[in-house]
Image (cartoon, rainbow, N blue to C red):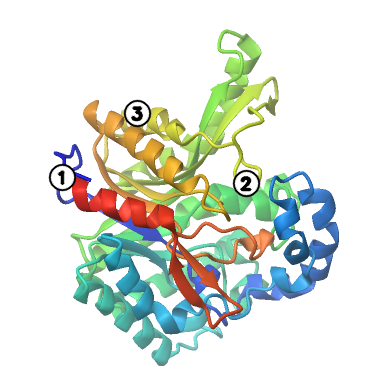
């Protein structure tokens, strides 16, 4: 592969993402407690919910096993992070988004664990020593059990605990060493699945509580921003919003167009509009293009990834244009990837995504970075272990052996020739 002149700036951040609960192992938070309570139920209903997936025959024994829904030892990233960071570097990546597990550093209210703070300090230093830019993600869906028992983010009085936690982050993690911090991951998804549909903990189905939680998360982000900026005014701060490329199935149909506009505003722009003065860059995660026919999504039947999600990687292009037009701030794609156990689609997904990013940059979009989800195979929340998003496969039955997938090797070579 010949060296080519690249449209991407030489300082462009090429990276990968992880979340603490999904990879570290041996966490104890509200999610681990929920896993134990629903694992058997999840396994029993899997045949009905997953039988139409194209890979059902491959994953059915795992999906019907309650152990699939327990995060347990994770992929032991907590202990093997130095190895994983070395793999990251070998893949020609220069940045890494990782999570801080609140339940580790404050397992009980007001009780701080110095050893855990030291762990994260060493973690960040290892990234810096390898010339990899750390992107610290402060909150990624999990909560200490004591905080969840107080009502979590649905109780506005609890914001004071979040403020205290973020102040401690600034104190303990030598925030002056960092350039980038992501405050919250996908607040729209969290509020929807936890408090509206009730599919995730705390399994509440109440539109009012969902709305209150979402509004509280706006306040929480603004407070985080102020606290972090006071500690390090040079810090670049944003969120990892979940944005979808929402389109009308029938472009000239009034109902389809109206529903599309409402969905775009509610899902994509409501939260970002309210924090716009409190973000230095716009971070967003992209997985979905959704076509609306009337009040329901009506996506093409193919191609689909292993989770049954319709795949349109180039859908990130119109989304980049809209984000740039809305906010005129630097953009970082904080997550983007595909569940692909057989590594059939990942190279195509990456190729199409990079073509879309090139096109957006050529049209004036200030895109600064791209973080692929995920570096490692990980625990995929309510789905458990069978979805495989990793650039690196992890054999959990064979001492957590890491194996770089062929698509990742291809991408690494591409990066070597296009930086």
Q: Position of residue 315 (x, y in %)?
A: 46, 31
Left or right of 372 on screen, residue 359: left
- Foreground mark, 2 or 1? 1
Q: Position of residue 271 (x, y in %)?
A: 47, 42
- Disc on res. 211: 2
Q: Which residue is mark 3?
A: 321
Outermost residue, top side: 252
Residue shown at 70% from the left, 48% from the top: 196
SS category of the residue bearing label 1:
loop
The 10 Å Cα crowd at callout 2, few under 14, some 14 to 19, many 20 or more, is some
SS category of the residue bearing label 2:
helix
* Res 354 visible: yes
Residue shown at 63% from the left, 62% from the top: 381
Residue shown at 21% from the left, 66% from the top: 232
Q: Which residue is mark 1?
A: 3
Instruction: Decide which of tag 2 and tag 1 comes sooner along the chain.
Output: 1
Looking at the picture, tell me which residue is in the foreground, 401 or 149.
401
Q: Quadrant of residue 201?
A: bottom right
Q: How far apart are the alpha carbons under marks 2 and 3?
A: 28 Å
* Res 215 visible: no
- Foreground mark, 3 or 1? 1
Looking at the picture, tell me which residue is in the foreground, 70 or 224.
70
Instruction: Decide which of tag 3 and tag 1 comes sooner along the chain.
Output: 1
């Amino acid at each position: 592969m010949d060296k080519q002149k690249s449209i991407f700036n030489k300082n462009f951040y090429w990276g990968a993402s992880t979340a603490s609960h999904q990879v570290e192992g041996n966490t104890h938070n509200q999610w681990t407690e929920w896993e134990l309570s629903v694992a058997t139920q999840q396994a029993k209903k899997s045949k009905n919910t997953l039988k139409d997936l194209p890979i059902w025959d491959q994953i059915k024994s795992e999906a019907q096993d309650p152990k699939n829904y327990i995060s347990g030892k994770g992929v032991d990233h907590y202990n093997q992070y130095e190895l994983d960071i070395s793999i990251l570097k070998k893949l020609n990546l220069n940045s890494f988004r990782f999570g801080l597990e609140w339940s580790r550093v404050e397992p009980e209210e007001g009780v701080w664990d110095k050893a855990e703070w030291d762990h994260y300090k060493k973690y960040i230093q290892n990234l810096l020593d390898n010339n990899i830019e750390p992107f610290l993600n402060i909150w990624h869906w999990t909560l200490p059990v004591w905080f969840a028992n107080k009502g979590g983010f649905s109780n506005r009085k609890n914001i004071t605990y979040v403020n205290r936690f973020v102040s401690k982050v600034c104190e303990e993690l030598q925030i002056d060493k960092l350039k980038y911090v992501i405050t919250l991951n996908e607040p729209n998804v969290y509020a929807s699945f936890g408090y509206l549909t009730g599919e995730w903990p705390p399994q509440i189905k109440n539109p009012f509580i969902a709305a209150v939680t979402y509004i509280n998360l706006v306040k929480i982000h603004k407070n985080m921003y102020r606290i972090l900026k006071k500690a390090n005014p040079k810090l670049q701060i944003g969120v990892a919003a979940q944005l979808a490329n929402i389109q009308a199935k029938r472009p000239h149909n009034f109902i389809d167009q109206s529903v599309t506009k409402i969905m775009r505003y509610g899902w994509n722009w409501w939260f970002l509009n309210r924090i716009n003065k409190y973000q230095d860059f716009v971070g967003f995660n992209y997985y979905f293009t959704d076509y609306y026919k009337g009040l329901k999504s009506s996506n093409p039947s193919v191609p689909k990834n292993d989770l049954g999600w319709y795949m349109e990687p180039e859908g990130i292009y119109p989304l980049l244009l809209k984000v740039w037009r809305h906010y005129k701030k630097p953009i970082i794609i904080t997550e983007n990837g595909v569940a692909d156990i057989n590594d059939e689609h990942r190279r195509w997904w990456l190729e199409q995504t990079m073509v879309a990013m090139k096109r957006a940059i050529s049209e004036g979009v200030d895109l600064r970075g791209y973080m692929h989800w995920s570096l490692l195979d990980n625990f995929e929340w309510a789905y458990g272990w069978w979805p495989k998003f990793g650039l690196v496969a992890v054999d959990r039955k064979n001492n957590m052996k890491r194996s770089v997938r062929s698509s990742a090797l291809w991408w690494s070579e591409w990066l070597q020739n296009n930086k």
